[in-house]
Amino acid sequence: MSRVRAFMAFLYDFIVGDDPVIAGVVVIALGVTALLAAGGAAAWWVMPAAVAGALSWSVLRAGR
Amino acid sequence: MSHDALLFASVFLACAVEGVEAVTIVLAAGITRGWRSAWAGVAAALAALAAFVALMGPALTALPLSALRLVVGGLLLVFGLQWLRKAILRASGFKALHDEDAIYAEEVAELGGLPVAAQGLDAFGFTVSFKGVLLEGLEVAFIVVTFGSNQQNVPLAVVAALAAVAAVVTAGVIAHRPLSRVPENTLKYAVGVMLTSFGMFWGAEGAGASWPGGDGAIPVLVAFTLLVSLALVATLRRRHSRIGAVGGSEVQA
């Protein structure tokens, strides 16, 4: 059981990393992109905007 | 230009673009995380790709490439942003330069030898190489099947694709030596920028968005990511110099 827990912890750390907010923003941004694209609107700008926002927020908070 | 020459040129160029994307990712993983893991990722991806192609054949065109792009793009983006975040904090003095190996060793120790069971492979290097080669390889196969069957000359399309892959891999081998002399943190910074840019591109495409300029948007995304990250490094450096004490201000990411 402890090996399973250790593996899950490794997997979480491997995928999500130091700042879970970044992973959360990526998932939300992909969802928003899909919704906009499905509605026929231009959606390419969502990912760059989300990346700039999430990265800035994350590093500025870490360097406080 | 004859139909055959046009087919060869189209498939060669399309596959070269896909090949450059895959080779860039493998080079980045190999130089920063070790060639053993990167090559293992390439080999596993090629084996998976061969199985896919053998199993599906012409039915390859029915593969949900968008879903694959969404998953691979999303994961690459999360990985890339993790790397870029650490690289920005290192470049601005908020994080020690060589902490990565120590952190990874700690993770390995916590796993009770799990990565050792995987023959000491670096999971990050393996996964990034595997995903990059598998996705691009599938796109190459897709290009060969669609272009080749539309022009009723799949063998010529296969030759063009192989020529493109050989040309790109040769260029990658030539570029590998000069790249290995670049300082470690600069490389990690560059890898973060590349993974983030490819991740944005594939993720958005997988979610259904169309990039202005198609594949031409990738260099623009690389420039955009680099500019944003450099602006953040500059801001954090100013903040760090205001704080003053170098050792005392190191953050735990």
Image (cartoon, coloured by chain):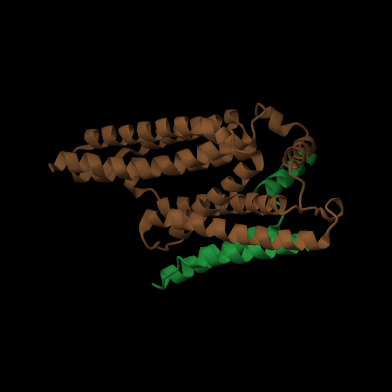
Tell me if B78 is positioned left or right of B23 in this view.
Answer: right
Nearer-the-camera pick, B106 or A53: A53
Percent coordinates x, y for residue B148 in the rendering: 23, 41
- Residue B184: image quadrant is top right
Quadrant position of the N terminus of chain B in the picture: top left
Nearer-the-camera pick, B135 or B241: B241
Q: In the image as oriented, which residue stretches furthest toward the left? A: B2
Q: Residue at x 64, y 39 (%)?
A: B183
Q: Residue at x 76, y 40 (%)?
A: B107
Percent coordinates x, y for residue B101 in the rendering: 73, 37
Chain letter for green, please: A
Tell me if B48 is positioned left or right of B128 in this view.
Answer: left
Percent coordinates x, y for residue B241 in the rendering: 78, 59
Nearer-the-camera pick, B38 or B188: B188
Tell me if B129 is positioned left or right of B247 in this view.
Answer: left
Percent coordinates x, y for residue B15 in the rendering: 34, 41
